[in-house]
Amino acid sequence: MESPEPFPDFPEPPARPEPPAGRRPVRCALCGRPLTGADSRRAGLGPACDAKLHPPGPDIRTRRHEVEQDPLPGT
Ligand SMILES: [Zn+2]
């Protein structure tokens, strides 16, 4: 009875392409994609995910403008 080798000769897995020293890849905190843009790496988020977390809404600005405090009566 022959016992076939469970694992035939297979080539060694290719070495992972390591990034050059000093340039560690930054990954998006949300989707894990490697970030290439300087802004994205600084923010730690891809442009798309950054937009998701920080939607450009003029609400805050306009709100600040719209909110008017009543002047204190009595003066
Ligand atoms: Zn992302």
Image: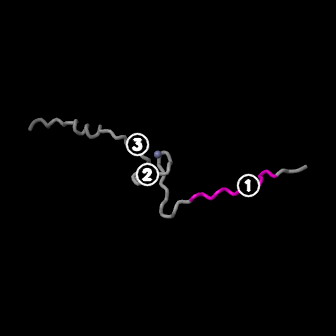
**Coordinates of residue 28 in the picture (x, y in percent):** 47, 49
Up the image or down, 23 lies above or below 57; here it is below
Of the numbered discs 1 and 2, the one sitting upstream in the chain is: 1
Characterize the local packing of mark 1: few (<14), some (14-19) or many (20 or more) Cα atoms within 10 angstroms: few
**Coordinates of residue 53 in the picture (x, y in percent):** 40, 42
Of the numbered discs 1 and 3, the one sitting upstream in the chain is: 1
Residue sitting farthest toward the right: 1
- The kind of residue on which mark 1 rests is Phe
Q: Which residues are magenta?
A: 5-17
Residue drawn at x 91%, y 49% as measured from the top left: 1
The residue pinned by badge 2 equals: 44
The residue pinned by badge 3 equals: 53
**SS at circle 1:** loop
- Whether ligand 1 has any atom under 8 Å from the Cβ at mark 1 is answered as no
**Coordinates of residue 38 in the picture (x, y in percent):** 41, 54
**SS at circle 2:** loop
**Coordinates of residue 47 in the picture (x, y in percent):** 42, 46
The residue pinned by badge 1 equals: 10
In this rendering, the label closer to the viewer, 1 or 3: 1
Residue drawn at x 49%, y 51% as measured from the top left: 34
